[in-house]
Image (tube, rainbow, N blue to C red):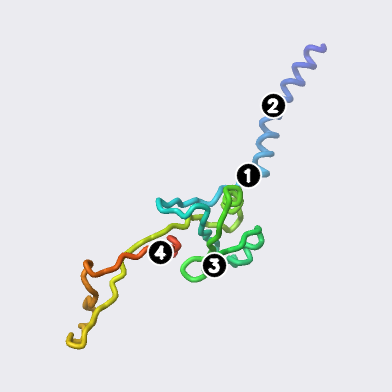
């Protein structure tokens, strides 16, 4: 009789375990972190956080204990800030964060238009700049998300 009771108890525990485990995992799903975009020319510890349009970048950053270096509300909605690895993990798991991107240095050539008094007025739509030989190379820190916008 005891053996039958022990077997029935074991069978009941085994039968109910998957049900209990299924309800526990369904009640608290793991948050999916926002994507992290990396860069070859990243500035260590510096990130650009893109938020949902409904969130205010300054208020959001301050609500999780961050001080934004810059806030963006036109091309993107977000902010630039320095983050530790733990802060990066917290930001990526926060509600309303669409993506996090490493801030990076970008470079390019700046070719200002040249015109002299003897030159005729430029034709609308025609290139009035100089050749690449006379351009100056410049390097600047520009948020890469803003550079793509």
Image position of 112 (left or right of 83): left
Q: Residue furthest right?
A: 1
N-terminal of the pair, mark 3 or mark 1, is 1
N-terminal of the pair, mark 1 or mark 4, is 1
Kindly identify which residue carries mark 4: 140
Marks 4 and 2 sit apart, C-alpha to C-alpha, by 64 Å
Disc 3 crowd rating (10 Å Cα; few below 14, some 14-19, many 20+) is some
Disc 1 crowd rating (10 Å Cα; few below 14, some 14-19, many 20+) is few
N-terminal of the pair, mark 4 or mark 2, is 2
Kindly identify which residue carries mark 2: 15
Secondary element type, mark 3: strand
Q: Position of residue 95 (x, y in %)?
A: 61, 56
Secondary element type, mark 4: strand
Tell me the quarter of the image containing the N terminus: top right
Marks 1 and 4 sit apart, C-alpha to C-alpha, by 42 Å
N-terminal of the pair, mark 1 or mark 2, is 2
Q: Nearer the viewer, residue 25 or 5?
A: 25
Q: Nearer the viewer, mark 3 or mark 1?
A: 3
Q: Nearer the viewer, mark 3 or mark 4?
A: 4
Contact flag, marks 1 and 4 (Cβ < 8 Å):
no
Marks 3 and 4 sit apart, C-alpha to C-alpha, by 18 Å
Contact flag, marks 3 and 1 (Cβ < 8 Å):
no
Kindly identify the residue that appears in the image at 26 percent across and 69 percent down.
135
Kindly identify which residue carries mark 1: 29
Marks 1 and 2 sit apart, C-alpha to C-alpha, by 23 Å
Kindly identify which residue carries mark 3: 71
Marks 3 and 1 sit apart, C-alpha to C-alpha, by 31 Å
Tell me the quarter of the image containing the C terminus: bottom left
């Amino acid at each position: 009789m005891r053996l039958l009771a022990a077997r029935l108890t074991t069978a009941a525990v085994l039968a109910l375990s998957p049900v209990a485990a299924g309800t526990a995992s369904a009640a608290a799903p793991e948050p999916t972190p926002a994507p992290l975009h990396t860069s070859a020319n990243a500035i260590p510890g510096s990130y650009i956080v893109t938020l949902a349009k409904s969130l205010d970048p300054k208020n959001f950053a301050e609500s999780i204990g961050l001080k934004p270096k810059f806030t963006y509300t036109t091309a993107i909605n977000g902010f630039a800030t320095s983050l530790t690895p733990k802060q990066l993990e917290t930001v990526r798991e926060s509600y309303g964060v669409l993506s996090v991107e490493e801030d990076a240095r970008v470079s390019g050539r700046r070719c200002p238009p040249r015109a002299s008094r003897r030159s005729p007025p430029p034709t609308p739509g025609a290139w009035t700049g100089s050749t690449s030989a006379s351009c100056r190379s410049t390097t600047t820190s520009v948020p890469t998300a803003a550079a793509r916008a």
